[in-house]
Amino acid sequence: MTTKQIKPDFSWSQIDTILLDMDGTLLDKYFDDHFWEEYVPKIFAETNGLSLKEARKKLLQRYQSVENTLQWTDLDYWSERLGLDIPELKCKVDHLIQVHPYVTDFLDFINSINKEVHLVTNAHSKTLDIKLRKTALGSHFDRIVCAEEIGFAKEQPEFWDKLATHLGFNKNRTMLADDTAKVLRSAKQYGIGFLIFVARPSSRIPVKFSPEYPSITYFNELIF
């Protein structure tokens, strides 16, 4: 049974600050899924004389052991752990990095109504550099914050309190858009006033609305 969409219901006059996730929210998560699930296992298998199946099994165990922590997105950690130059490998497939439809339209709209907008991502700073070079989205944001700068991943409740101190926003008048339910739950626990779930993080998977949060497929749904 498909979850029915809970549509966003707010006025922009209620919001001063917008926090936007990057991977899956602004950018098509197909790049990340392909990189970690297909490309890295292929290179890891070739480097270590393993079958692709064996490589995938080993990597999945390692991925799961650090899920929802800063290590999961730390490219230096994975380069050392896997014996591969992960930033270099990302650059080899960076043609797959794509901005979701209507993202730039939305960012232009937000800038036109004079809201503060910050990119807030768990992505490692090296990943961020690669993606901002490829997409040229950086100029749309007042601030860009990586979780490593805060010292916690967004799934951890401590992240939001530190971020609020860092950016100086009023949580009751702040919106967060993210494609990860755990992140939205953590932000809700802290008290972020408006939460939006991005229901199609990857162009290769079907839309899946959240049963808990207002959902959008594309950001044109928030241009009003």
Image (spheres, rainbow, N blue to C red):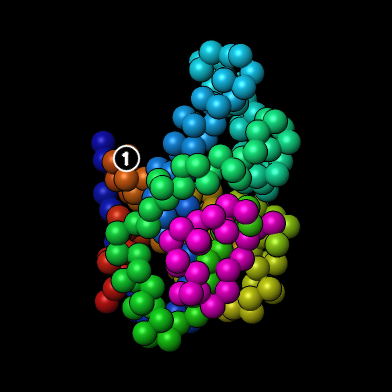
Q: Magenta-highlighted stretch: main secondary structure?
A: helix
The kind of residue on which mark 1 rests is Arg
Towards the viewer: 132 or 213? 132
Rendered residue at 57%/59% (across/down): 129
Residue 28 vertical placement versus 111 (above, below): above
Towards the viewer: 172 or 30? 30
Q: Position of residue 122 (x, y in %)?
A: 59, 54
Question: What segment carries the magenta color?
Answer: 126-148
Q: Is residue 47 left or right of residue 96?
A: right
Towards the viewer: 26 or 42? 42
Local secondary structure at mark 1: loop
Rendered residue at 59%/78% (across/down): 169
Rendered residue at 26%/36% (across/down): 1
Residue 114 forms part of the magenta stretch: no
Towards the viewer: 151 or 10? 151
Residue 126 vertical placement versus 66 (above, below): below
Can residue 174 be seen from the camera position used here?
no
Q: Quadrant of residue 108?
A: bottom left
Counting labels gives 1
Please rate how many residues cluster around mark 1, counting C-alpha atoms within 10 Å: few if below 14, some from 14 to 19, many from 20: few
Residue 145 forms part of the magenta stretch: yes
Rendered residue at 52%/46% (across/down): 91
Q: Position of residue 117 (x, y in %)?
A: 49, 75
Q: Which residue is mark 1?
A: 204
Q: Is residue 18 left or right of residue 89?
A: left
